[in-house]
Image: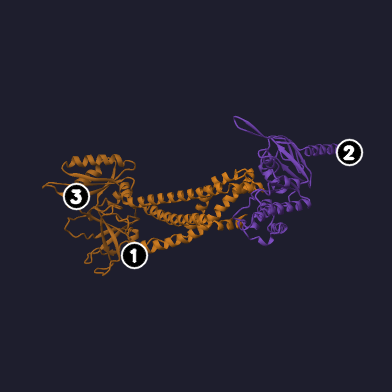
Amino acid sequence: MEIRPILSALMRSKVSMILIGLQVALTLAIVCNALFIIHERLQRMDRPSGMNEADTFIISSTGFGQGFDVKSSQQADLALLRSLPGVADATSAITVPMSQSGWSTGVSLKPNQTTDTASTALYLVDAHGLSAYGVQLVEGRDFKPEEVQFKTFNERVVPTSVIVTRALAQRLFPDGDALGKQVYYDNEGPASTIIGIVERLQTPWLDSDFIDNSTLAPVLFPYGNATRYVVRAEPGRRDEVIKVVEQKLQEANPSRILSKVRTLEQVRAEGYANDRAMAIILGAVIFALLAITALGIVGMASFWVAQRTRQIGTRRALGATRFDILRYFQLENFIITSIGLVVGGVLAYALSLWLMSAFQAPRLPWHYVPVGFLCLWTLGQLAVLGPALRASRVPPAVATRSV
Amino acid sequence: MLKMTHLQKVYRTHLIETYALRDFSINVAEGEFVAVTGPSGSGKTTFLNIAGLLEEFTGGSYLLDGVDVHGLDDNGRSRLRNEKIGFIFQGFNLIPDLNLFDNVDVPLRYRGYGAAERKRRIEEALGRVGLSSRMKHYPSELSGGQQQRVAIARALAGSPRLLLADEPTGNLDSLMARGVMELLEEINGQGTTIVMVTHDPELAARAQRNVHVIDGQVTDFDAEASLRQSSSAAAADTAIA
């Protein structure tokens, strides 16, 4: 292997080596961290909400007029919705996962506790809540119709029985015996009894640090004259059901305004729009950086081949085969890339430390850098292949041609 | 050592054919020092390129140290070139970014010698041309004559059977040219066959034999006589056998 003579020749023309090496180093540092951020975002976007998202949609209804009674209207709408063909179940809801708006509260183990034991999102539903959301009950039981309270906007909501997510149950009762225990959603009481535990139901806030802590309470609570319904269609019938629901609700009360008809998939897409945009932008940055680096290597290698045509011919005249010439340029690129990668590896971890301190980002996992090494080595070898093949085709007779 | 018979080299375009060598025959015996002379464009460099396996020919035959080079592929030609031939170029053709040690090392690496063997050969070759004390210097730090000496050391390091020199003193002043010529004579005196292309009659006169080339053909009587003599000797050998 010609590593030493190549290295000593490179040391004689340091500028080119430093330029390419620096480009490789910066590319590695940025690509590793950007890939990690993309991976983080994708993982975030992939978190399950706990709902049956494929078949579910939400629709809002606002009534008008002096005679409009929100309670009876809500009851009639729910009865209508549940009777429609293709509707698996429906409930009213003020909180929807990933929608970025809803209710939250603190929950304590004792009355008048100074600090809440946990924070939780509050889902106010009727006895069809679990079924309409499509969440999975893993312990205990569902709400009974007689447990459901109707509250108006000015009344305190203090449920006597609640269903909590497994994460919240674990947080409140780490020994795993939450079912049947009493907790406090209001400092002054009364206590609420945990009658069931569901596997998962995310809070509406995607950046929340208690995203898996949710409480379902048997309360119907219209927001003024507005009510939002969560409707779960039978598998595969969501889109046809949306049209029927809109039509039937409008027919039932022509003076109402129906709005914000969105599937849960749309809610998810809107909720994670920033994450998706970030992933796309970083992906484009990575692509651009890799392309610029590859083009830089191609350009520099092409320049070197053109500059060294006589030298290549001389090497061929002295006995180098075409493969020897090809290998020379590949090896030269490998050496430059390796030097850049060593510097880039240090830069990658340094950039990660800066992101950690400036943006509370998680630490870059160690394996990103070696994987980046492999990718950039491969990129460098592929980029230099064209010029190297051109060099290998330089005929040995070039050695005797006059300049 | 080098036997070309009715060699032909034609450059073809879709419009014309140009004969660089036509019915070119020459026989160089082992240990000879032959000067090939001729005007510009006569075919001297084409001859040298073909002799050095740098170019292929289009007709005739060429035996190098008994090996028919016609059927060799590119790798075979590279290997044979590396093993049998040492080159000395008019422009020295040293690699500017390598020091003298590494310049002389270039053909030895392609030969596949181990590090110790290469070091021994490099030191010996550079010692032979009087530059062993400047191994770590770069070509740009040497005079033209010294650079050509390095090129000669590079050519000698692999112990070639044939040394091909293309206007070896063309870029040197008369004093340096004399020194290089004396070195070539010394090398030839030690048994290495030398074929030197030159347009300098004074240099050519110092060779054992002159071959004059005009319009791609050998016009020197001695060369043709030598070829006939060689053919007769071969026929006699066959008869005796």
Chain letter belonging to callout 2? B
Please tell me whether mark 3 sits on a helix, a strand or a loop: strand
Does residue A302 appear left or right of residue A55 in this picture? right
**Viewer-proximal residue among B18 and A254:** B18
Q: Quadrant of residue B65?
A: top right
Chain letter belonging to callout 1? A
The residue singled out by tag 2 in the image is B240
* Residue at 41% across, 51% down: A285
**Quadrant of the snapshot with the C terminus of chain A:** top right
Q: Gap in Å between the C-alphas at discs 1 and 2?
A: 111 Å
Judged by depth in the image, the label closer to the viewer, 1 or 3, is 3
Q: Colour of chain A?
A: orange
Q: Earlier in the sequence, mark 1 or mark 3?
A: 1
Q: How busy is the neighbourhood of tag 1: few (under 14 within 10 Å), some, or many (20 plus)?
A: some
**Viewer-proximal residue among B174 and B217:** B174
The residue singled out by tag 3 in the image is A226
From this view, report whether residue B7 is shown above or below residue A14: above
Does residue A211 appear left or right of residue B213 in this picture? left
Q: Gap in Å between the C-alphas at discs 3 and 2?
A: 121 Å
Mark sitting on residue A173: 1
Q: Amino acid at mark 1?
A: Phe
Mark sitting on residue A195: none
Judged by depth in the image, the label closer to the viewer, 3 or 2, is 2
From this view, report whether residue A403 is shown above or below residue A173: above
